[in-house]
Amino acid sequence: MVSRGGKICIGVSLILVIAIGTVIATLSLTIFKIRDPVISIHPVGLENLKFSLNFSSNVSLGMILTMGNPNYASFEFKNSISHVNFHKNVVADVPIQGEVVPARGTINVTTSAGLMVEKLILDPDFFTDISTGYLNLTSTSVLPGIARVLKIIKLKATTYSSCNISMEIHTKAVSSNCIAKLKL
């Protein structure tokens, strides 16, 4: 038979375990809820715009990628390559240098996309799009990395992003719209 002091100890321990479980559940559903990152592309402009008759020229599109992390965990991603597509054909590779995005912070990554002009021009839809005055591209990237919660817990995480990029032919103005998802 358990003494009166033992019953009180068991009761207090049980209440303490329930309280801690409730606090952990509440925090995981509110503050520590996983939110998708915010990624945007800020084109710097078209560089090295040179066309030749053999269509072997490349055009560099300088850009700044802004990555915002709304989570309470920092995200460290490895070097990666993003792909720029024109009607499902890869027309550029964009190297992305590995970085750490701090918890609830934002970083800027400078890079450039080397557009392969010959692949663009040989695409049957190229001249149709050019006649509208805009060149529409899509960019996809996968950034594998590690999410660190309170610098204690490490979780494997991957960010997937897809961006629609629209280039106005006459003014060389570039605009983008990105959607990003974080998967643990």
Image (spheres, rainbow, N blue to C red):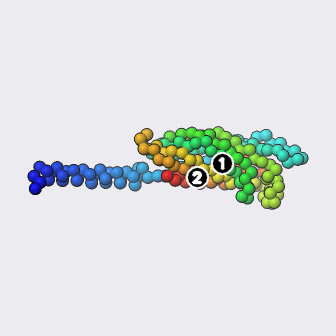
Q: Residues within 10 Å of mark 1 (few under 14, many from 20)?
A: some
Depth order, front residue of 161/144? 144
Residue 91 visible here: yes
Q: Position of residue 23 (x, y in %)?
A: 32, 51
Asked if residue 132 is positioned above or below residue 13 in the image, the reply reads: below
Q: Would you name the residue on which mark 2 appears?
A: 160
Element class at badge 2: strand
Q: Position of residue 27 (x, y in %)?
A: 37, 51
Q: Answer with the quarter of the image where residue 129 lies.
A: bottom right
Residue under the point 11% across and 49% down: 5
Depth order, front residue of 107/171? 107
Give the residue furthest to the front: 1
Amino acid on which the number 2 mark rests in the picture:
Tyr
Amino acid on which the number 1 mark rests in the picture:
Ser
Depth order, front residue of 157/130? 157
Element class at badge 1: strand
Q: Quadrant of the N terminus?
A: bottom left
Q: Answer with left or right where residue 89 lies relative to residue 180.
A: right
Residue under the point 58% across and 42% down: 78
